[in-house]
Image: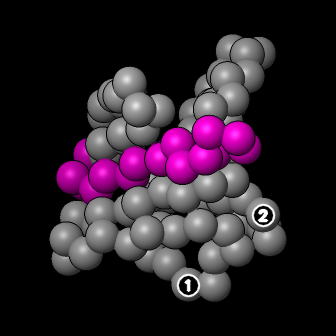
Amino acid sequence: MVCFNANQIYLHFDNHVTITVEGTLTYQSASNGVVQKLSPPVSETNLMQLVGHKLEQITGKSNGTLSLAFDDNSIVECLDTSPDYESYQLSFEGRLIVI
């Protein structure tokens, strides 16, 4: 599920795994290869094309970037854009990790 509010973008996965983006993410669509750079509030995006697709690979970088690769070859990157504020949060198995 993909959800939006004025201050956050939510990516919901199976098993109650959630990524809450309060900073910036990029979305590269497999259908056209276009990369969108998104920060809340989002007024327009193709991010909903991810609904129903399976997450195949997750990688983290030392700079705080979290990369998500999907079964349709789409890529989402959650960026750590601010050293002073939360950029994104991971919630899984009762744990919360704030980046």
Residue at (30, 63) in percent of width and height: 28
Q: Is residue 79 magenta?
A: yes
Residue situated in front as seen by the camera: 82 or 16: 82
Q: Is residue 75 magenta?
A: yes
Q: How is the image coloured?
A: one colour
The label on residue 44 is 1
Q: Is residue 35 left or right of residue 91?
A: left
Picture layout, residue 12 above or below residue 41: above
Answer whether residue 99 is visible to the viewer in this image: yes
Residue situated in front as seen by the camera: 83 or 58: 83
Query: Residue under circle 2?
Result: 7
Magenta-drawn segment: 71-87
Amino acid type of the residue that numbered disc 1 sits on in the rendered structure: Glu
Amino acid type of the residue that numbered disc 2 sits on in the rendered structure: Asn
Task: Characterize the local packing of mark 2: few (<14), some (14-19) or many (20 or more) Cα atoms within 10 angstroms.
Answer: few
Whether tag 2 and tag 1 are in contact, CB under 8 A, the answer is no
